[in-house]
Amino acid sequence: MGLLSGDWVMVGEVAVTYRKRYYVENPDSGTVTKVQNEIDDLKQIMVKNIDSLSQRGERLELLVDKAEDLSNQSTQFQRQSRELRRAMFWKKCQDVPHDRWNW
């Protein structure tokens, strides 16, 4: 007597049940497990990358702040040096007698 279509379904169900039990008892032997492990590894790498990027962003913010401070200090130095140059010019003018001016 040949196999009927219902028999094939029963054979298929037995095979599926056997495979499920096999993968449950041997979780390291399946392709799905390997792929899941690769995904977990990839997630760990991505988390590390995101942490590195956030740390880099923080360092960049500090660098920008320091650059702004340096710019402000250089502007202040330029203003103060100009004021000192003018003050020294006028002091020199006061020290020279008026009859020696060559205007």
Image (cartoon, rainbow, N blue to C red):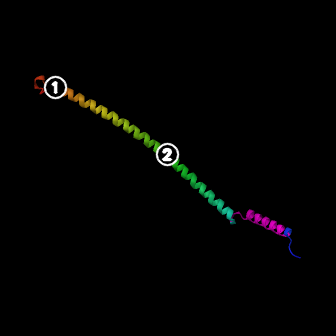
User: Gap between marks 1 and 2, in whole Å?
Assistant: 57 Å
Tell me where residue 34 appears, x and y as whole percent: 65, 63
Mark 1, residues whose alpha carbon is within 10 Å: few (<14), some, or many (≥20)?
Answer: few
Marks 1 and 2: which is nearer the front? Answer: 2
Query: Please, what secondary structure does the residue beneath circle 1 have?
Result: helix
Number of numbered tags placed on the structure image: 2
Residue in view at x 17 percent, y 26 percent: 93
6 displayed left or right of 23: right
What residue is pinned by disc 1? 95
Q: Is residue 86 left or right of residue 39?
A: left
Q: Nearer the viewer, residue 102 or 99?
A: 102
Q: Quadrant of residue 96?
A: top left
Span colored in magenta: 7-28
- State the residue at coordinates (60%, 54%): 43
Q: Quadrant of the C terminus?
A: top left
Residue 29 bears which disc, if any?
A: none
Find disc 2 in the rendering and name its residue.
Answer: 57
Magenta segment's dominant SS is helix
In the rendered structure, the answer to whether residue 37 lies left or right of residue 77 reads right
Place of residue 87 in the rendered image (x, y in percent of width and height, measured from the top left): 24, 28
Residue 3 magenta-highlighted: no
Q: Is residue 36 above or below residue 97?
A: below
Which residue occupies the extreme right position in the image?
A: 1
Q: Is residue 103 left or right of residue 49?
A: left
Q: Residues within 10 Å of mark 2 (few under 14, many from 20)?
A: few
The residue drawn where x is 86% and y is 68% is: 6
The type of residue carrying mark 2 is Gly
Q: Earlier in the sequence, mark 1 or mark 2?
A: 2
Residue at the far left in the pictured view: 99
**Image coords of residue 64 (percent x, y):** 43, 41
